[in-house]
Image (cartoon, helix red, strand yellow):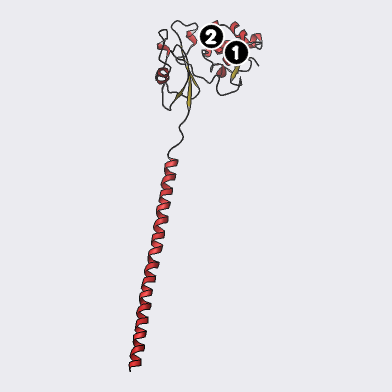
Amino acid sequence: MEGISKRKMTMITVAVAFVAGGIYFFSQQGEDPADTEDIFSVTAKEAEMEQSVNESAPEPEIIKVDVKGAVKSPGIFTAQAGDRVIDLISSAGSFTEKADTDKVNFAQIIEDQMVIYVPEIGEEDKGDLENIQVGTSGGAVTKGTSGGLVNLNTATQEDLQTLTGIGPSKANAILEYRETAGKFKEVDELKQVTGIGDKTFERLRDSISVK
């Protein structure tokens, strides 16, 4: 009987140990996947949030504007999207005492490669100046231009009107001269066009060619 009791005790001990080991094993198996899932879930959410932030922050547009004429500090200035003419004139030190401010559209929105020309009071040929001269002279190359210069021998009316101080009437005068007198042989010949005086020509000299 004593031998049988010992075997029973041994079997009970082994059974208890087996059950305890099983409980421990399954408890560990239940925790690890949950922890692993939490780690990957947090990492995925962080990556998604970072990508969302990067996509919602586009690079700012670079806008360059050339301010000329009757301003205290003419030059090329960097503007921000939504800026208006008055903002760039302020950047150029505001108007001089001779500025004809009635010819300036303060509220016009700025565009890249824009040219703002502020005429002086009583300036020669001011009748052909628009409220604000806007163009891409010296900037983007278009048909009728060469290396950023407007070619007087191939330019269209639209090309000519990108030049500072050249409105529709002066552009037509240049085209009529080219049709009657032939191609321009040199840039100085532009002064022979009706309405193009010395001051106007000096403003245009660095923006035109006769190639």
In this rendering, the label closer to the viewer, 2 or 1: 2
Q: Mark 1 points at which residue?
A: 175
Q: Position of residue 206 (x, y in %)?
A: 57, 14
Q: Is residue 152 above or below residue 62?
A: above
Whether residue 136 is situated above or below residue 129 in the rendered picture = below
Q: Is residue 177 visible?
A: yes
How crowded pointer 2 is (Cα within 10 Å; few <14, some 14-19, many 20+) is rated as some
Residue displayed at 36% across by 73% down:
23
Q: Mark 2 points at which residue?
A: 200
Residue lying farthest bottom?
1
Residue 133 spot, x, y in % from top left: 48, 16
Give the residue type at disc 2.
Thr
Residue visible at 41% across and 46% down?
49
Q: Position of residue 142 (x, y in %)?
A: 58, 23
Circle 1 crowding by C-alpha within 10 Å: few under 14, some 14–19, many from 20 = many
**Earlier sequence position, callout 2 versus callout 1:** 1
Callout 1: SS: helix
Is 51 situated above or below 187? below
Q: Is residue 197 visible?
A: no
